[in-house]
Amino acid sequence: MTATAGILCAVTSAFFNGSFAALFKTEEMAVLNISPVVFQLYVSAGVFLSSWIVIPFLKYNPEMLGDMQIGRTFEFSPLGLVGGFLLVLALYGSFQAVDRIGLALGQGIWGGTAMVVSYIWGVVVFHEKPSKIGSSVGGLIMLVLGVAFIAFCDTIRQYVSKKIMRGRIDADVEASIPLRLELDVAASYDDDEAQIIQRDAGVYSRGVSWAFFVGLSGGSILAPLHYVPLSQQGLVSLPSFGVGAILTAP
């Protein structure tokens, strides 16, 4: 496979990976009020059924991967099952995260985390060498900072909002607004903020934790396939991958 084809496949994968969870937030799903666990079961069933679509294309597997020693007939892959299990973990966590913090925030966290985890698998564990190590490390650092900002954006917003409100109260005091009014405004603001924080902080933190969990498991999905023999690489492992997904679905 050429570098251009590989990049095209990666972009296509990113598109579908960034879109599957959106179906859970559609109006139809909101009306049905389906549990994330149940929806994840449907997704696992879809993974299992679609994984067998590759069977007619197995004969092209060696040409696609550029190695004529790679298998072109179906062969059961135990490590494919492991990959399917990791996919189920990622799917389960993704719907739990989306249910708590939304798709945009959840996808931002688990997408960046998955890329960092995949990079560690490739460079540290499998000793792959990027063509420009400095640029890759720099990009990784920016990615980590971006993920951290996304994860804690709500905390930053609350901090900034509180500072702004305090500044307004101080300005009102300097303008000789009665002290009683200042205290009432401050108390009202603090009570409202405390109620919001108490109600949302637990849900938000659990959602962020689930998103990081998705990135950890999702970034490791392909790692087991690194150890499969040549006869099970590429498309050959996908049916076993689908079997692992449906067997381990909740």
Image (cartoon, rainbow, N blue to C red):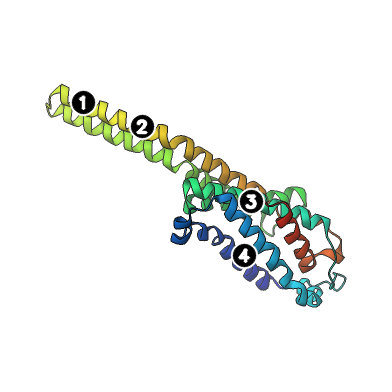
Q: Identify residue for label 3.
A: 90
Residue 207 visible somewhere in the drawing = yes
Mark in front: 2 vs 1 = 2
- Secondary structure, mark 2, is helix
80 or 34: nearer the eye?
34
Quadrant of the frame with the N terminus: bottom right
Specify whether 217 is left or right of 35: right
Of 169 and 194, which appears nearest the observer?
194
* Residue 237 tag number: none
**Residue, disc 1:** 184
Give the spatial CA distance, label 3 vs label 4. 15 Å
**Amino acid type, label 2:** Gln
Query: Does the residue at mark 1 contact the one at mark 3 (Cβ under 8 Å)?
Result: no
The amino acid beneath tag 1 is Asp
How packed is label 1: few (under 14 Cα within 10 Å), some, or many (20 or more)? few
Q: Give the residue displayed 37% in from the left and 37% down from the top.
A: 158
Residue 139 visible in the picture: no
Mark closer to the chain start, 3 or 4? 4
Direction front: furthest residue: 32
Q: Is residue 164 left or right of residue 113?
A: left
Q: CA distance from mark 2 to mark 3?
A: 32 Å
Q: Quadrant of residue 87?
A: bottom right
Q: Amino acid at mark 4?
A: Ser
Q: Residue 31: image x %, image y %? A: 44, 57
* Amino acid type, callout 3: Ala
Indicate left or right for 120 with 142 as reference.
right
Residue drawn where x is 19% and y is 26% of the image? 182
Q: Which residue is mark 4?
A: 13
Q: Secondary structure at mark 1?
A: helix
In the rendered image, which residue does mark 2 sit on? 195
